[in-house]
Image: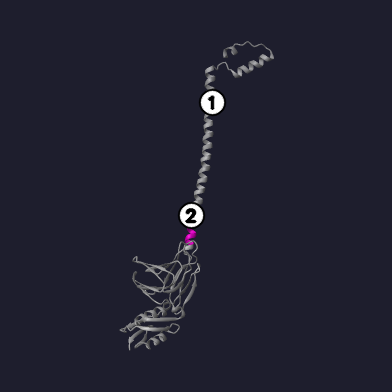
Amino acid sequence: MEDNINNYKYDDSVEDLKLRSFVEQSFPKKMDSNSIKQKTFMKIHDEQRRSHRRQWARVSVAACILLTFVCLGLWKILDTRRVETLTACTKKMEMQHIIVPVGEKMTIMLSDGTKLVANSRTTLSYPKTFQGAERREVSIKGEAYFEVAHDAEHPFVVNSGKFKVKVLGTRFNISNYDDSKSSVVLAKGSVEITTDNKDLVRMKPSEKVVVENGSFVEKTQVDAQDYTSWMDGVLTLQGESVNDIAEMLSQYYGVKIVCNHVNSTPLYGKLVLQDSVMDVLKTIKGMVKIKTIRKNGEIYIVTN
């Protein structure tokens, strides 16, 4: 075809002049068919490469967009967890710490409706709110009477150092002024005591449990009212010795009382705690022959 076009004889007509110009531009004499094919293949190859580049560009853009969304999602999750952690830590730090002054009592209402009466020199720690907690937990050092609001899904736990008292809804008195010896008296309901030495004790109303050095010692039947009379400013004696009474008064009034060779006669009666410690000791003198000496801020009790 190329030879036929190149060998064509043109005349001077306008049509042949136009045809000649077109042929010379489209089919140069020096270009053979192989050259035309090569250029055509090169053009097709260039188009394919440009097409591949466009496809890779689209894939790269899509990958960048996907990666951006993944990063944003991870950031959102991590940020949410960080906020939750900070909120949990904040709630955990919102604790109330109370120390009852010497010779006084304090009535406290907790956020769940639980009422407690704390005795003289008692230290309490409890969260400002129990909302969101799996269990309601307070810590005590001293003596307190609890009326626990019932909540079966959120047990109430009293942490007393050497043991824990777990309840659902009940009334009980706990005393742990002394690190070595503590007691729990149940007035109503039921409680479960777990000691540091893994003793497990379940209590019924009008029972008293004694824990000493982190171990269960004994469980006895008592009149619960005798162990809660301190809320009315009265200490009920139920056969305690002078040594036992001196220890209780020392804890209540915050003064050191030392007994030297005093007999262990059991005493019964009531002591009025609104009186001064020396007036209370005068009452004891009427029960047993003792003499009291006050020296350097301490009180010594000796046999008279």
Q: Is residue 218 magenta?
A: no
**Mark 1 / mark 2, whichever is N-terminal:** 1
Q: Residue 7's spot in the image, x, y percent?
A: 59, 11
Disc assigned to residue 81: 2
Instruction: Indicate the amino acid at tag 2.
Output: Arg
Of the pair 70 and 164, the residue shown nearer to us: 164
Against 35, residue 275 (above or below) is below
Which residue is more in the foreground, 250 or 157? Answer: 157
Extreme-left residue of the structure: 261
Provide the secondary structure element on which disc 1 rests.
helix
Tell me where residue 247 sits by quadrant: bottom left
- Looking at the rendered structure, which numbered label has been put on residue 66? none
Q: Secondary structure at mark 2?
A: helix
Spot occupied by residue 108 in the image (x, y as percentages of width and height): 49, 72
Q: Is residue 154 above or below residue 52?
A: below
Residue pictured at 52% horizontal, 23% vertical: 41
Q: Quadrant of residue 273?
A: bottom left
Query: What residue is at 69 percent from the left and 13 percent from the top?
Result: 13
The x, y position of residue 218, in whole percent, is 34, 72
Q: Main secondary structure of the magenta part?
A: helix
Q: Which of the 4 quarters of the picture holds residue 145?
A: bottom left
Give the total of numbered labels.
2
Image vertical order of residue 87 relative to residue 49, above or below = below
* Residue 296 visible in the picture: no
Give the Cα separation between the discs numbered 1 and 2: 56 Å
Query: Which region is colored magenta?
Result: 85-90
For residue 259, say whether it is visible: yes
Mark 2 is surrounded, within 10 Å at the Cα level, by few (under 14), some (14 to 19) or many (20 or more) other residues, namely few
The question of residue 88 being in magenta is answered with yes
Q: Which mark is residue 44?
A: 1
Amino acid at circle 1: Ile
